[in-house]
Image (tube, coloured by chain):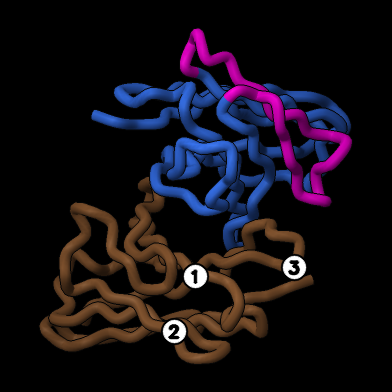
Amino acid sequence: QVQLVESGGGVVQPGRSLRISCAASRFSFSKYAMHWVRQAPGRGLEWVAVISYDGSNKYYADSVKGRFTISRDNSKNTLYLEMNSLRPEDTAVYHCARDPVTTRVLAWYFDLWGRGTLVTVSS
Amino acid sequence: SYELTQPPSVSVSPGQTARITCSGDALPNQYAYWYQQKSGQAPILVIYKDSERPSGIPERFSGSSSGTIVTLTISGVQAEDEADYFCQSADSSGSPVFGGGTKLTVL
């Protein structure tokens, strides 16, 4: 069925880097903008970043700007999040999520989510 | 920073109506969205643009808006509706913002 599956999470030391991935299946991935949303233990959801359908536009939350990079490979139906200079407060389950419209204008909400991958930043 | 406020928990008996509120100063000017998340599962969109229901979502789920408060209503609650519910809107820059979530318990 239509789904998003995240991978690549794990335990990483503060200041180090990690790249997580999101594999899309059974929909036209290249037509949709894609987001990353994180959920810290005991806290709510926090939007992290978005990339347009063709990768030409990217936007970030202030909390990760300059440290995280969102990218995509439409030939592989895969979304990525490169996380550098990781901090303990980046510890969270990271979900990828689909923006519902297939136009250049983002809808800024999420009609399909993955289960997430846990990133733990700890020494 | 902009905040959306939800009650931490709501409890109802099966067959009753559950109402989950979300308050925020910008809600009169921004759409609200609602997500259901069961333990260990991916969130699911249950209401978009204040009151629209995606295909596949049961009719017992509805949304409404009044001033700075939006409400998710679940009529005839079933045991399977037990989950966390999150509201979402946007801040002044258009970036998504979420409420803290409400745990719905079906007694």
- Residue extending furthest bottom? B67
Q: Separation of disc 2 and disc 3 at Cα? A: 19 Å
Local crowd at mark 3 within 10 Å, few (<14), some, or many (≥20)?
few
Query: Is B76 or A8 nearer to us in this picture?
Result: B76
Q: Residue at x 49, y 43 (%)?
A: A99
The relative height of residue B35 versus residue A36 in the rendered view (above or below) is: below
Structural crowding at the residue carrying mark 2, measured as other residues with C-alpha within 10 Å and reported as few (<14), some (14–19) or many (≥20): some
Q: Which residues are magenta?
A: A54-77
Residue flagged by tag 1: what amino acid is it?
A: Ala
- Of labels 1 and 2, earlier in sequence is 1
The circle drawn on residue B65 is: 2
**Tag 1 and tag 2 share a subunit:** yes
User: In this figure, which residue is indicated by the disc labeled 1?
Assistant: B32
User: Going 36% across and 61% down the picture, which residue do you hit?
Assistant: B36
| Residue located beneath label 3 in the image | B92
Q: Determine whether label 1 and label 2 are within 8 Å by CB.
A: yes
Question: What kind of element bears circle 2?
Answer: strand
Q: Looking at the rendered structure, which numbered label has been put on residue B80?
A: none
Residue at x 60%, y 23% (from the top left corner): A54
Can you give x and y, in whole percent of width and height, for residue B5 in the image? 59, 81
Horizontally, is A88 left or right of A42 in the view?
Answer: right
Q: Quadrant of the N terminus of chain A?
A: top left
Q: Main secondary structure of the magenta part?
A: loop
* Residue B89 figure quarter: bottom right
**Chain corresponding to brown in the figure:** B
Q: Which chain is blue?
A: A
Check disc 1: other Cα within 10 Å, few if <14, some if 14-19, many if 20+. many
